Image (tube, helix red, strand yellow):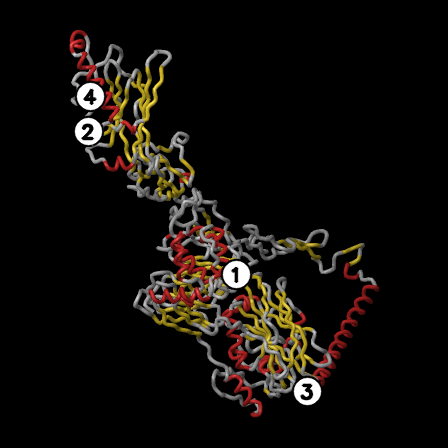
Amino acid sequence: MGRAAATGGGGGGARRWLPWLGLCFWAAGAAAARGTDNGEALPESIPSAPGTLPHFIEEPDDAYIIKSNPIALRCKARPAMQIFFKCNGEWVHQNEHVSEERLDESSGLKVREVFINVTRQQVEDFHGPEDYWCQCVAWSHLGTSKSRKASVRIAYLRKNFEQDPQGREVPIEGMIVLHCRPPEGVPAAEVEWLKNEEPIDSEQDENIDTRADHNLIIRQARLSDSGNYTCMAANIVAKRRSLSATVVVYVNGGWSSWTEWSACNVRCGRGWQKRSRTCTNPAPLNGGAFCEGMSVQKITCTSLCPVDGSWEVWSEWSVCSPECEHLRIRECTAPPPRNGGKFCEGLSQESENCTDGLCILDKKPLHEIKPQSIENASDIALYSGLGAAVVAVAVLVIGVTLYRRSQSDYGVDVIDSSALTGNSLLLNSAMQPDLTVSRTYSGPICLQDPLDKELMTESSLFNPLSDIKVKVQSSFMVSLGVSERAEYHGKNHSRTFPHGNNHSFSTMHPRNKTPYIQNLSSLPTRTELRTTGVFGHLGGRLVMPNTGVSLLIPHGAIPEENSWEIYMSINQGEPSLQSDGSEVLLSPEVTCGPPDMIVTTPFALTIPHCADVSSEHWNIHLKKRTQQGKWEEVMSVEDESTSCYCLLDPFACHVLLDSFGTYALTGEPITDCAVKQLKVAVFGCMSCNSLDYNLRVYCVDNTPCAFQEVVSDESHQGGQLLEEPKLLHFKGNTFSLQISVLDIPPFLWRIKPFTACQEVPFSRVWCSNRQPLHCAFSLERYTPTTTQLSCKICIRQLKGHEQILQVQTSILESERETITFFAQEDSTFPAQTGPKAFKIPYSIRQRICATFDTPNAKGKDWQMLAQKNSINRNLSYFATQSSPSAVILNLWEARHQHDGDLDSLACALEEIGRTHTKLSNISESQLDEADFNYSRQNGL
């Protein structure tokens, strides 16, 4: 059957072809009834009776096949006698059509609706130059009409984005542009942006634009714009999420205004004043740069010293007045009081009789007016004074005689030169004996080092009585346990006992000489404590046992394939650092080396100190000795610096350094409330005389190395620690120190005369770090059967702190309880290398550094890690390091070398919210495995 070329007809032409048209119409209906299996196409139009062409009420729409579900295409037309679908140029079989017919009541025309199903297989099997398409063809009496072509496509959405948004770090008020290209898909995916999993509505925020080719544009970044951004792509098939992009809006720090200059730190003379500023305008946030420059400035200042007034010399006497008096005056002008100084004390005017009693009163010379009662009173006073003087001399003679007899049991006379003059030092506790004078014995004696003092002879004690032969025992020999007599003559010259030889005294009996010299010659000569260790790329820890001094070499500080022998020493001799003015040495001088070694990461040096830390009362400095032997200041602990870092703990200072050398801490007291911490301890030992027992009380700086020096000395002298050492807070208020022995059993023990209470000048205690300061007390038993000693040692500062040492001991060595000097926690391994030297396992340390070195949207970076570890000052130092978190953890390792409190670190990390794993819960096997893997990676 052929195709009709015409789509309609009319007039004569229509009538000529009417028989043929009827035949075609019948044929078309028959063909439609039989189907289109023969492949012949239906005519494009068929002539019909007069009427209207079909009008499509509903045309087929474009459709998408989702997964394997078929889609339905619909069309509806009126008037329509037949409707068929034609897909990709071919007629769809009649059996695949579903049609419905009804009469439109308003127009009286027939309405026909037809739909077909299209499957995924049909679309996939079509291979044409264009998409799979279908259209409707409707017939009426007048002709045919065609609908629009509807395409049918298989819907999909690929998984991977063509471009994921990238994280950005932008300054505040900067522009942020995040690019997003969604995955390929049919139909094309629509894009939506999420911030912290919440949709972004650009219509409500004029600062955000999401219309430009799927990109997100923030015109001016705000702190609230920090967050995690995600690009969401979706169509009718699926949704896809891009990788999250972290946007950090950071704020660079800015300095606040300078504060006003503080008052001068000294009331009189040359001092300093400072002003400060803080990095809070604004404060650095979200990894923003810390402020550059110093936060503290200091300048010198000079305060005018108050000058107290002083009197000029008296003027000449004036002319005698009618009242028989003349006057003289003086002025307070030599010098006059200045700058708040005190006015002169006393009278500025004096008057007296100018006639030597010849002035007339009631017509009699004044010198003749002497009542009898006055004369009698004068005589009585004169005679009473003479009598009292005679009685006093007699009592003194009798007392001295009885005293010498009572002391004959000792076999020696201990005489205080001040007693001969009637001025006993011990009776006036306010007086401070000059302990630097080696030739004068005045009761209490406090020796810095027995070997450094000269033996005292009677020539200095009894110079006015040089021709008298007396027997005297030096308290220095008493403190060393020499109780036998030694005869001295007034004209003999005193000598200085030499170090390290067996020089004897001609005035000393041979039987006394041997034990005395052996006791002294056994004392060692101290110069320094020293320890060494070999370290490589893995780092390690070098510890000076029982001194509080340690050195931490971080992992990676030494280049790979290199190793160094690192040493550390403590100067125990005379300090080379000479204090200037009021400056005090607060720590030992610590040397670490070799000096030419170069490290790539700062190492941590821990130095103990004896200051009661307070920025209000102390100005503490770190000093370093130059190659020329001079000391120069590295930094003040309170200053800001990018060259090194000082963290001051109550008993130690942890210093991060880049170069080796000799370092020490000094302190300048700002007020009288500045406190040095002293350790007080009492040692005891038997004397050469079996009845004597010696007590030695030490007051040393509260540093382990200072006390170790005392223990070393006492071990050579046979001394035993009798009571656990205690802490004494010694103020810089210029008041001296008193040491006394109390509550001695009266019928069992007695103390040598004039030694029960001893006083040490303030300056000797305040600068006691040069040599251990101690006072000696000599006790004697009444009988050899007394083996128990019970007493109290009182150490107190006048107008200051006090400590009581309770002595309860046996003088027999076999019955004495041993008191431990030091904890042994750091005595076994002075040098540790590799992972075992560190408390934090290396794998966990790497994770912490990787987490906190990277800025975070919520500000959880290394600055918060520092804050949680009580590091709140001089953060600019860490900002200059390649890994600030690693340096902070190195400082943590130095501070916790003994406790290794991983729980505290884990709690700090949990508070930050970056990790919830407790480090202390890691089993030993896990740590060993981590260390083993780490060792394998590093070729160990």
Q: Could you give the CA–CA distance between mark 3 and mark 1, rounded to whole angstroms?
A: 47 Å
Q: Residues within 10 Å of mark 3 (few under 14, many from 20)?
A: few
Q: Could you give the CA–CA distance between mark 3 and mark 4, rounded to whole angstroms?
A: 147 Å
Please report whichever mark, 3 or 4, sits nearer to the chain's N-terminal start: 4
Look at label 2 and name its amino acid. Gly
Look at label 1 and name its amino acid. Pro
- Residue 459 makes an appearance in the image: no
The answer to whether residue 932 is above or below residue 882 is: below
> Which residue is labeled 1 in the image?
650
Please report whichever mark, 2 or 3, sits nearer to the chain's N-terminal start: 2
Q: Tell me if 394 is positioned left or right of 775 in this view.
A: right
Q: Point out the frontmost of discs 2 and 3.
A: 2
- Residue 807 makes an appearance in the image: yes
> Which residue is labeled 4 in the image?
43
Please report whichever mark, 1 or 4, sits nearer to the chain's N-terminal start: 4
> Which residue is labeled 2 in the image?
39
Q: Position of residue 464 (x, y in %)?
A: 61, 80
Along the viewing direction, whichever of 802 and 375 lies nearer the viewer: 802
Say which element carries label 1.
loop
> Which residue is labeled 3 in the image?
784
Q: Could you give the CA–CA distance between mark 4 and mark 2, rounded to whole angstroms?
A: 13 Å
- Residue sitting at x 74%, y 81%: 398
